[in-house]
Amino acid sequence: MGRPNAFDGMMHEFCANLNWCGGVEDRAPLHVSDFIPDTGPVSADQFAGWLIMAEGLDPDRFSASERSQLKTVFVKHMGTDVVDASKLRSGHHGV
């Protein structure tokens, strides 16, 4: 089993503390990781939108203030507002 990384800490805060855990669409579980590309830059704003979409919600219905709260958590854990998508993977093997 691997060691937790920054992404794991961020996802713990989003899910356990803020209740952004993902949802169900067409009877299939949906998680923010389903939206993350294999490579390329990912901004805190993009990630916030994907987090909202993973809940089955429309990101356009969220205010800038609400999105800002999500982006703040991203920057807190990832250390910057843009990271390569490869950094958005769990440190736990098989997760």
Image (cartoon, rainbow, N blue to C red):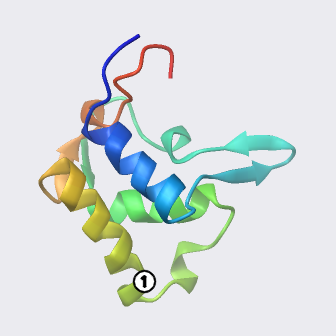
Identify the residue at image location x=26%, y=69%: 72
Task: Give the residue at the far right of this rendering.
Answer: 27
Identify the residue at image location x=59%, y=45%: 31
Residue toward you, 51 or 58: 51
Identify the residue at image location x=18%, y=53%: 82
Residue 53 lies, in percent from the top left, at 59, 61
In this view, 15 is above or below 94: below
In this view, 61 is above or below 28: below
Residue 20 lies, in percent from the top left, at 55, 60
In this view, 37 is above or below 74: above
Residue 70 lies, in percent from the top left, at 37, 69
Residue 75 figure quarter:
bottom left
Residue 78 lies, in percent from the top left, at 20, 49
Residue 76 figure quarter:
bottom left
Identify the residue at image location x=43%, y=14%: 93
Q: Is residue 75 in view?
A: yes
Residue toward you, 87 or 77: 77
Seen in the image, is 80 located left or right of residue 56?
A: left
Residue at which label 1 appears? 66
Q: Secondary structure at mark 1?
A: helix
Mark 1 residue crowding within 10 angstroms, few (<14) / some (14–19) / many (20+): few
Number of numbered discs overlaid on the protein picture: 1
Task: Give the residue at the far front of this rendering.
Answer: 17
Quarter of the rendering occupied by the N terminus: top left
Task: Give the residue at the far top of this rendering.
Answer: 1
Q: Disc 1 residue type?
A: Glu
Q: Is residue 50 in view?
A: no
